[in-house]
Image (cartoon, helix red, strand yellow):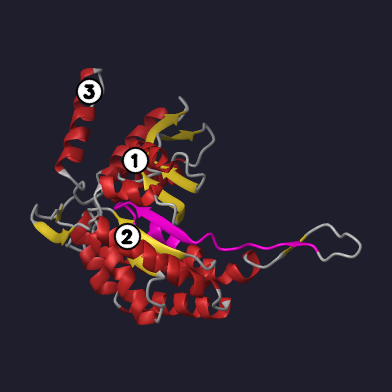
Amino acid sequence: MQIQRTISPVDGRVYVERELAGPEALEQALSRAAKAQKAWAQTPLEERLAVVERMVEVMLGAVGAVAEELTWQMGRPIRYSPKEITGGFAERARYMARIAPVALQDIPAEALPGFTRFIRREPLGVVLVLAPWNYPYLTSVNTIVPALLAGNAVVLKHSAQTPLVAERYAWAFQEAGLPEGVFQYLHMNHDLTAKAIADPRVAFVAFTGSVAGGRAVERAAAGQFKGVALELGGKDPAYVRSDADLEHSVVNLVDGAMFNSGQSCCGVERIYVHEALYEPFVEAFVAETLKLKLGNPLDPETTLGPMVRTEAAEFVRGQIAEALAQGAQA
C-alpha cells in the first residue's frame, strides 16, 4: 500500500494523507466510466447543462471552506483563494455551458442534390484529466466541464499537492445529481498514471503541467492514436516600449511576475524595457514590489505567500545567487 502525503507550505505539516490507487482500482474506474458514458451520451444536453449549473452552485455554496483548504494545500494567500472559485471556476464553467448549445450543434455541409449533409460532433468516450496544483480549479474546469457537456465521462487525476480539489469535484457532482461513474477521480503515482494514459478505454488525455511531465504523457500515449492536449510551462517575456504607460506597465508586470509567488504557467519571467524608460521603470518596479506583504497566507492582509515546496524556494535562491554573481543588484 502506497501513501500520498501532502505537505502544507503554510507550516510544513502533513495536511492530507491518502492511499494511492492500485491497478484494480484503475480497472474498476475505467470500466465504470466506459459503461456510464454510453448512457450519459444519450442524455439530452439540457439535462447535462442543468447538472453542471447545480454543481457550480454547490461549489459556490461552500466557497469559504473550499478556499481555506486550497490555501492550506498550496499556500496561496486566503484573500485570493475565493476568487479562483467565484471568478475563474464558476465564470468559466458557466461560459462553457452558455456556448455549448451552439458549439455542439450540427454544422451544415455543402449541399448535394438528394442528400442532407452535415457534420455532427460525437463524444469521444472517456477523458482523462491530469491537473496541476497552481491553479487547481481554474485549469481543471477548462476540460472537465466541456468534456461532460459533450457527453464524455471524465476521470480526474489531480496533483499530489491539491488532492482535495478532486474530492471536492466528486462531492459537488454527486450533490448535483450526476449519474454514478460519469465523473470519477483517482489518486495515482506516475506509473499507474502512465497505464491509465495508455489504456485503450481512455480516448483523450488533457495535461497541464511541466514540460517534463508533457514528455512523459506523450511517451505513455505513443502508438495509441488518441488525442492528447498539453498545456506546458514556458518562459514568458514582456516588452515595455518607449511609449508605454509607465504606471500601467509596472502595476501589471509586478502582478504578472509575483502573483501566486510567481508559480504560474504564464508568469512573467523576463522583462525587456526600452532604454528611454529603463531607469524610471526599474525604480517604480522595485517600489511596487515592496508594497507586497509577505506572511502567513491565512492572514487576510498577506499578499505574497510561500512557495509551494522547499526545493522550489531553494531553486529561486539559486537563481538569485547566480544573478548577483553576474553583477545584478538586489
Residue at 25%, 17% in the rendered image = 326
- Work out whether residue 91 or residue 178 is closer to the camera in this orientation and state it: 178
Q: Please report the bounds of the magenta region as a residue range.
A: 117-144
| Residue at the farthest top position | 326
Instruction: Tell me which corner region of the image, top left, top right, bottom left or bottom right, holds residue 232.
Output: top left
Find out whether residue 200 is within the magenta segment: no
Residue neighbourhood size for the residue with mark 1, other residues' Cα within 10 Å, grouped as few (<14), some (14–19), many (≥20): some
Mark 1 and mark 2: Cα distance apart in space: 23 Å
Which amino acid lies under the numbered mark 2 shown in the image of this protein?
Glu
Foreground label between 3 and 1: 1
- Work out whether residue 222 or residue 310 is closer to the camera in this orientation and state it: 222
- Pointer 1: what residue? 213
Residue at 47%, 44% in the rendered image = 224
Q: Secondary structure at mark 2?
A: helix
* Marks 3 and 2, the one that precedes in the sequence: 2
Instruction: Tell me which corner region of the image, top left, top right, bottom left or bottom right, holds residue 74.
Output: bottom left
Which amino acid lies under the numbered mark 3 shown in the image of this protein?
Glu
- Pointer 2: what residue? 27
Mark 3 and mark 2: Cα distance apart in space: 48 Å
* Marks 1 and 2, the one that precedes in the sequence: 2
Mark 3 and mark 1: Cα distance apart in space: 26 Å
Where the N terminus falls, by quadrant? bottom left
